[in-house]
Amino acid sequence: MSRWTIAEQAQVPKGTGCGEDRLVVTGDEPGTWCAAVIDGATDKSGRTYEGLSGGALAAECLAATLRNLAPGTT
């Protein structure tokens, strides 16, 4: 398996708060095994789920799934 490293990363929401997009980078030394940019859907309903919009909640669920993948998962 080839190894690579993240040289730079940033997440800047359009407005205030954490936004609905997520950046996930997982790995250990000597390298990274998963990197993903999750584009959370813009929720126009106005509902919140424990303080998160529907789009942010969906992005969080996907990010949590990726963070829990075992190394070498294809």
Image (cartoon, helix red, strand yellow):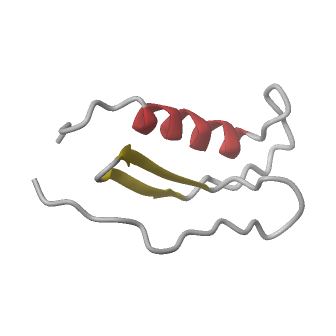
Residue 37: percent from left, percent from top: 49, 60
In the image as oriented, which residue stretches furthest toward the top?
Answer: 50
Q: Please state the horizontal and vertical placement of residue 23, each as a whole percent of the image.
A: 55, 56
Find the residue positioned furthest to the front: 29
User: Residue 61's x, y, as percent?
Assistant: 55, 33
* Residue at the image position 62 percent from the left and 53 percent from the top: 41
Residue 37 appears left or right of 10: left
Q: Residue at x 69, y 44 (%)?
A: 56
Q: Is residue 17 left or right of residue 3?
A: right
Outermost residue toward the left? 1
Q: Is residue 47 above or below residue 42?
A: above
Q: Position of residue 57 (x, y in %)?
A: 66, 36
| Number of numbered tags placed on the structure image | 0
Residue at the image position 66 percent from the left and 65 percent from the top: 11
Which of the pair 46/29 is nearer the observer?
29
Question: Where's the C terminus, which quadrant?
Answer: top left
Looking at the rendering, which quadrant does residue 49 occupy? top right
Residue 51, quarter of the rendered image: top right
Q: Is residue 13 left or right of residue 2?
A: right
